[in-house]
Image: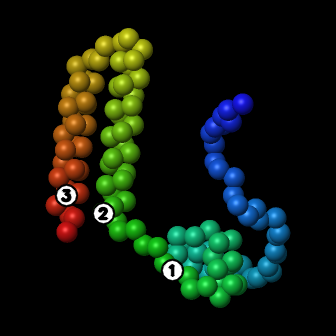
Amino acid sequence: MQVKRNRGGRPRKQVKKTEQLAVMCTPVDRLVIKAKAREANLTISEYLLQAGKGSPIKIKHIPREILQFTGRINHTAALLNQMARKLNCGLSLGEMERLLLVSCLETLQKLSSEIKSSLP
């Protein structure tokens, strides 16, 4: 019996969208639709598809604080990844990198406590 290997990548969709629909509009209409789609955190295609089906369009608003947390976490993770790569290659960290590592750890601890304090 042959074992099916997972090749990775994005999983296939159950229903593939194969039809294309063109809509003619003025430049002003396009800007308005684009702005409304951005406000709903959707692509223009998803926005028009939901509007055309008569589905209610839910505006997904991500609070600014969460976006700032995410940005700081991503930045810190990138710095830690660079240092880990250097250590895995057999190189040692310099004094500046060690200070940066301590700073990253402090930032992560601060973020962790801020997240815990903001939860109900």
Label 3 secondary element: helix
Relative to 57, 95 lies left or right: left
For the residues marked 2 and 1, what is the alpha-carbon distance in whole angstroms?
21 Å
Label 1 secondary element: loop
Q: Position of residue 58 (x, y in %)?
A: 51, 80
Query: What amino acid type should be assigned to the residue bearing mark 1?
Result: Lys
Q: Which residue is mark 2?
A: 65
Q: Are marks 1 and 3 in contact (CB under 8 Å)?
A: no
Relative to 115, 17 lies left or right: right
31 or 113, which lies in front? 113
- Disc with the residue nearer the chain's start (3 vs 2): 2
Instruction: Please give the name of the residue rendered at 65% of the width and 50% of the height, measured from the top-left corner.
Output: 11
For the residues marked 3 and 2, what is the alpha-carbon distance in whole angstroms?
13 Å
Q: Position of residue 50 (x, y in %)?
A: 64, 80
For the residues marked 1 and 3, what is the alpha-carbon distance in whole angstroms?
28 Å
Instruction: Please give the name of the residue rendered at 56% of the width and 86% of the height, measured from the top-left corner.
Output: 56
Query: What amino acid type should be assigned to the residue bearing mark 3?
Result: Lys
Placement of the N terminus among the 4 image quadrants: top right
Instruction: For label 1, count other residues whose C-alpha is less than 10 Å away and answer few (under 14), some (14-19) or many (20+).
Output: few
Query: What amino acid type should be assigned to the residue bearing mark 2?
Result: Glu
Tell me the number on the disc at residue 117: none
Q: Which residue is mark 1?
A: 58
Say which of marks 2 and 1 sits in front: 1
Tell me the number on the disc at residue 116: 3
Instruction: For label 3, count other residues whose C-alpha is less than 10 Å away and answer few (under 14), some (14-19) or many (20+).
Output: few
Q: Position of residue 35 (x, y in %)?
A: 57, 76
